Amino acid sequence: MSDSIISNEKVCFYCGTTNDIHKHHIFHQFGNRDKSEQDGCWIYLCMHHHDDYSKECIHNNPQFELAVKKFCQYVWEQKHGTREQFRERYGKSYL
């Protein structure tokens, strides 16, 4: 398991709770889940903000998901490389 480039603290990235915490791979589509794990592109989310059927769940809230992807890409570029390198690794840029 890699360290997250965002936060390794086991609290929900969205609301800060420590209850029912799940690991969310930020770039999980198109075969990028393993790359997300390797690069530390993941966060902790509580059940309500990860897999719940609510509108606040990252999988049901496109604005929340895009904001997290943009933030993670920004951090990745600061730590790992250029925007073009990100695009080559993950297939597209979110910034």
Image (tube, helix red, strand yellow):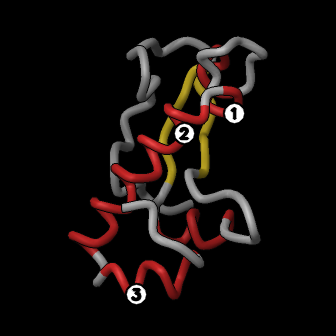
x 45%, y 70%: residue: 93
Q: Which residue is mark 2?
A: 65
Say which quadrant the N terminus sits in: bottom right
Q: Is disc 2 surrounded by few (<14), some (14 to 19) or many (20+) residues within 10 Å?
A: some
> Marks 1 and 3: in contact by CB < 8 Å?
no
x 48%, y 58%: residue: 41
| Amino acid type shown at disc 1 | His
Q: Which mark is residue 77?
A: none
C-alpha distance separating marks 3 and 1: 26 Å
- For mark 2, give the secondary structure: helix
| Amino acid type shown at disc 3 | Gln
| Amino acid type shown at disc 2 | Glu
Q: Which residue is mark 1?
A: 59
State left or right for residue 60 relative to residue 43: right
C-alpha distance separating marks 3 and 2: 21 Å
Q: Which residue is mark 3?
A: 85
